[in-house]
Amino acid sequence: MSLITQILSEDFPQFQSTNEISATDILSEVFPQFQSTNEISATAYARIDRKETPEAHVFKADLPGLKKEEVKVEVEDGRVLQISGERAAEKEDKNDKWHRIERGRGKFLRRFYLPENAKTDEVKAVMENGVLTVTVPKQEASNNTLPAILRRFLAFYLTLQFLSSRLDFSEENQTSRK
């Protein structure tokens, strides 16, 4: 225990028997309405790992304490994977006096744009031991298809070639226009 904690513990009971004192602890004692801002959830921004395997796009989220009924996985607009959920606050008994609230609670929502090769109608989600795993299978790539950006570039290039063949950019034509 630090010297400051020892000195303050004589006048402020919240300093007496703890090794971890934070500014939010003190503020919540002095200003009870401050405690509601302390309820910002650890799951408010659920951390999600995303990887791509040869067969699928895989998303993993640590969601400890959540049941699978409290988590929703859906595909919106054909290409947006949305993972959302909520951890509700515990029901309080009027006789209970909370000393510390550290476990996260609240809502979370994450969205991921899925690539063109995702089979969005075959999404699978599994919740096991507080870990959500979402698997989005990939379509088999055929060897004769070009990536979308190359197809667009090729279409643009061919359009330019077509237009330049139809338009006369010779010097005589340019001087006659002036």
Image: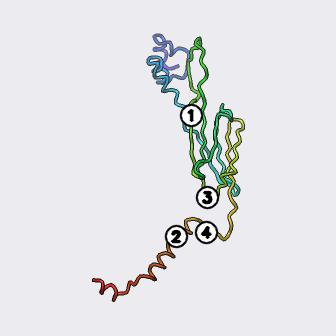
Q: Amino acid at mark 3?
A: Glu
Image height check: is 176 above or below 143? below
Label 2: few (<14), some (14–19) or many (≥20) C-alpha neighbours in 10 Å: few
Q: Is tag 3's residue or tag 1's residue first in the polypeptide sequence? A: 1
Whether 22 is drawn above or below 118: the answer is above
Residue assigned mark 3 = 116
* Mark 1 Cα shell of 10 Å, populated few (<14), some (14-19), many (≥20): some
Q: CA distance from mark 2 to mark 4?
A: 11 Å
Marks 3/4: CA distance? 12 Å
Q: The residue under label 2 is which amino acid type?
A: Phe
In the rendered image, residue 78, in percent from the top left (x then y), is placed at 60, 52
Residue located 62% across and 48% down the image: 50
Q: How many marks?
A: 4
Distance, label 3 to label 1, CA atoms, is 29 Å
User: Pointers 3 and 4 in contact (CB under 8 A)?
Assistant: no
Residue to which mark 4 is pinned: 146
Q: Which residue is mark 1?
A: 107
